[in-house]
Amino acid sequence: MTVYRITLGGHRHIFEGLPELLAKATPERSGDQLAGVAATSMQERVAARAALADTPLSRFLEEPVIPYEEDEVTRLIIDSHDREAFAPVAHMTVGEFRDWLLRYEVNGGTLASLAPGITPEMAAAVSKLMRNQDLILVASKIRVETRFRNTIGAAGTLGVRLQPNHPTDDAKGIAASILDGLLHGAGDATVGINPATDSVQAYVELTQLMDELRQAYAIPMQSCVLAHVTTALDAINQGAPVDLIFQSIAGTQAANSAFGIDLALLREAHQAGLALGRGTVGENLMYFETGQGSALSADAHHGLDQQTCEARAHGVARAFDPLLVNTVVGFIGPEYLYDGKQIIRAGLEDHFCGKLLGIPMGCDVCYTNHAEADQDDMDVLLTLLGTAGCNFIMGVPGADDIMLSYQSTSFHDANYVRQLLGKTPAPEFNAWLHAMNIIDERNHLVRPDTSQPLLTHAQSLTHSAPEDPA
């Protein structure tokens, strides 16, 4: 173990190993303070950053932050590392790597080639030396495209996960929310339902509902029920029309065990999904959700700061060629990200690290009602992520999830950022929206008329006209 010593302002600082150095260099956040790993002063934080800047990138390969023998996530990271891809930056320190990432000539193609050579800990380390604008600029260079029934992450696009949750899994309520979202141009990333229960029967019924709607209107979309991966496997064995397979994941073996999973189970689910052959333009079918603080909440963080654990979760996701990876950034609560400032920073960090590692990163721009945050903070993060090239965001009716009881982004928020930045839905989905007269030749939402088939369907479900998107 390397001990890091640095004198700053006449004070000598000592950091016992990479985990402590990374934690003390992290911007202030309540979760690290709760875990007892945060810097105790801004001076200590600056000293840790100075020491981290002089640390060789190669040291992260030589000194795993969790021992190789103790953690299967560490083994995955080390065993899958591509040394040939790493070669162009292998001689750099963390600080030199930051400066290199910001160069004009380092473009998306360069960073795509580099991604297999970057470990999650390297990505986390360099992010700790970056201002918000640095995180945005580097991430904006990187496009990560994935495909199932449409193409997510293409240049000039912003996907939306339509999230039509219902507290009792009522089919009529869910269907009405789906149709409302489709009429607002949402749903290209996926139509993803968080079920109120984890029963196999409910899972099967919800997948059937979404698949019947998709086929009825020939929608180039993919659906997902966000139940535990074992429930998905049981549903597949019962013949359910499963598109995407979901699982929450974390950055340590112990935290994943708390979720009831391991890498072998994820491999089994991935293979089961591939065997169904339901994709039409690609085979990316895993949907993972992450969030800073999950390892700490399971007492499974091994003394690591929560952002480094989060980056390691992205390393897990990378191994399964996912269609979507979503950081649910403010969902866990103020114990981990206290206020709007911390949530904004964490969202930009997660997006940057995910993109640098080569995964299709989206963000649930969200907060809980007991956090020191509000919708203005979410507007800021949403706008910043749009400029950074985020693959997708959430579309929740009214931005208020009545089943999960948290605040997210609405269909209108998605249309705001698409309009602001000139972005469109996924190309195949966008063509369908044109064909259905939901958007016009300018990619503007149009006022539905009574002959619009989706509007007719929505009215039959709700007995009233849906909200006018115009």
Image (cartoon, grey):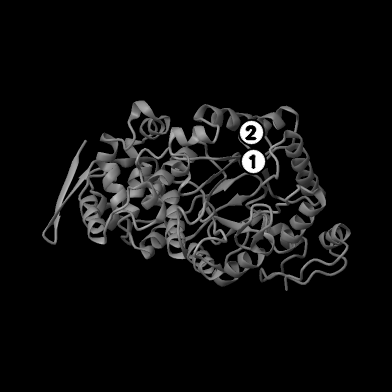
Residue 44 x, y percent position in the rendering: 23, 56
Answer yes or no: is residue 108 visible.
Answer: no
Q: Which of 434/400 is in front?
A: 400
Residue 61 x, y percent position in the rendering: 29, 36
Label 1 packing within 10 angstroms: few (<14), some (14-19), many (20+): many
Label 2 packing within 10 angstroms: few (<14), some (14-19), many (20+): many
Q: Which of 425/171 is in front?
A: 171
First reached walking from the N terminus: tag 1 or tag 2: 1
User: Who's the residue at 37% across and 28% down the image?
Assistant: 70
Image quadrant containing the C terminus: bottom right
The image quarter containing residue 432 is: bottom right
| Residue farthest toward the left in the current orientation of the protein | 10
Residue 114 against residue 130 in the figure, above or below: above
Marks counted in the figure total 2
| Residue named by callout 2 | 273
Alpha carbon separation for disc pair 1 and 2: 7 Å
* Kind of residue at badge 2: Gly
Q: In this rendering, would 215 be left or right of 165?
A: right
Residue 256 x, y percent position in the rendering: 49, 35
Answer yes or no: is residue 144 visible.
Answer: yes
The image quarter containing residue 370 is: bottom right
The image quarter containing residue 261 is: top right
| Residue named by callout 1 | 244
Pointer 1 and pointer 2: residues touching (CB < 8 Å)?
A: yes
Image quadrant containing the N terminus: top left
Residue 413 x, y percent position in the rendering: 61, 67
User: Who's the residue at 48% across and 53% down the image?
Assistant: 143
* Kind of residue at badge 1: Leu
